[in-house]
Amino acid sequence: MPLEIVRNDITKMAVDAIVNAANSSLSGGGGVDGCIHRAAGEELLNECRTLGGCEVGRAKVTGAYRLPCKYVIHTVGPVWYGGSMGEKALLESCYRESLALAKEKKCESVAFPLISSGIFGYPKDQALRVAVDVISDFLFSNDMTVYIVIFDRASFTIGEKLFADIEEYIDDYYAEEHTDRRRELYRRNAPDCASVCDKLCADRTVAEETVCADLSESLDDALKHPDESFSQMLLRKIDEKGMTDVQCYKKANIDRKLFSKIRGDVNYRPSKSTAVAFAIALELPLEETEELLKKAGFALSHSSKFDIIVEFFINRGNYNIFEINEALFAFDQSLLGEH
């Protein structure tokens, strides 16, 4: 998936570049800045001293030295003064300039911390919204894998009202008994239809044998003429929506290689998160979402918090996959587009 929120230590991310939330002197400091400098070694500070500092909203690049990446992109985020001092525009510039440098260095992957959300005081939910908006805009016209790295739960928040609304929706609909798991176990262990039919047909009268023969013939015919597959339905829906393939897989937060597999294999079976991601990209109502999921062998259930959160957003007509993923991450669920 091109944009992913992960919980990790950014100094351990094996990507082409990591972004450092630096101070204007580029001399190291506390928080993420200090961690990156300590992990990279004194060589990083020595190179930073040659750069002449960095202005707020701008970015500069150095080597990575002892870090497991190729480059460190240093950007200086704004201090939060209540939002009236141009903080949002400066923070957006941090992400845009960092991504431009990553592209210039031909990076295929880059990891960001949540810039300015620490000691600089930028509200975490607003900082996250800026990060996601700028990065998703960039990814719509560029191929790159971008990670927003959250060190711990305290470093991540979505809007309080949104969190409360989702929590209430889960409380209203969540079934403690996870019937989906039991259904899946049954499906795996259940005998196939042909075996059931054979058992039912044993020791029957002539009339009953005729019925069983009809059942077997119907089963054979169904197997010879299978229904529309997930891939076929997906491509049909894309055409019906007047979208291009690129528009669809970008909006679904799916990488091009995975989409090529789906397009090239009529029998491709996606993961549930991938199937839901396409339903969100196509802005399908709940009934059509269920129909698309069914083609991949899945269903939405009130025994799954993941499913309930997806349903929450669909019922409210919010098809922003990145906002949905923020909510899923906040509730410790898998993200849309994972495979």
Image (cartoon, helix red, strand yellow):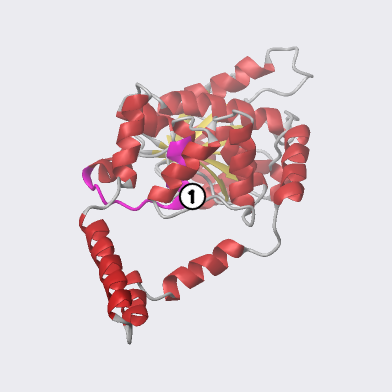
The number of callouts visible is 1
Which residue corresponds to the image point at 63% horizontal and 44% vertical from the top-left?
A: 309
Q: Is residue 94 magenta?
A: no
Q: Position of residue 164 (x, y in %)?
A: 78, 39
Q: Which residues are magenta?
A: 264-279
Q: Is residue 36 left or right of residue 210?
A: right
Q: Position of residue 11 (x, y in %)?
A: 54, 49
Residue on which disc 1 sits: 13
Viewer-side residue, 276 vs 221 = 221
Which residue corresponds to the image point at 70% horizontal and 58% vertical from the top-left?
A: 175
Disc 1 marks a residue whose amino acid type is Met
Q: Quadrant of residue 116?
A: top right
Q: Is residue 294 left or right of residue 285?
A: left
Q: Determine if residue 76 is in view.
A: no
Viewer-side residue, 110 vs 259 = 259
Q: Is residue 155 left or right of residue 72?
A: right
Viewer-side residue, 132 vs 86 = 132
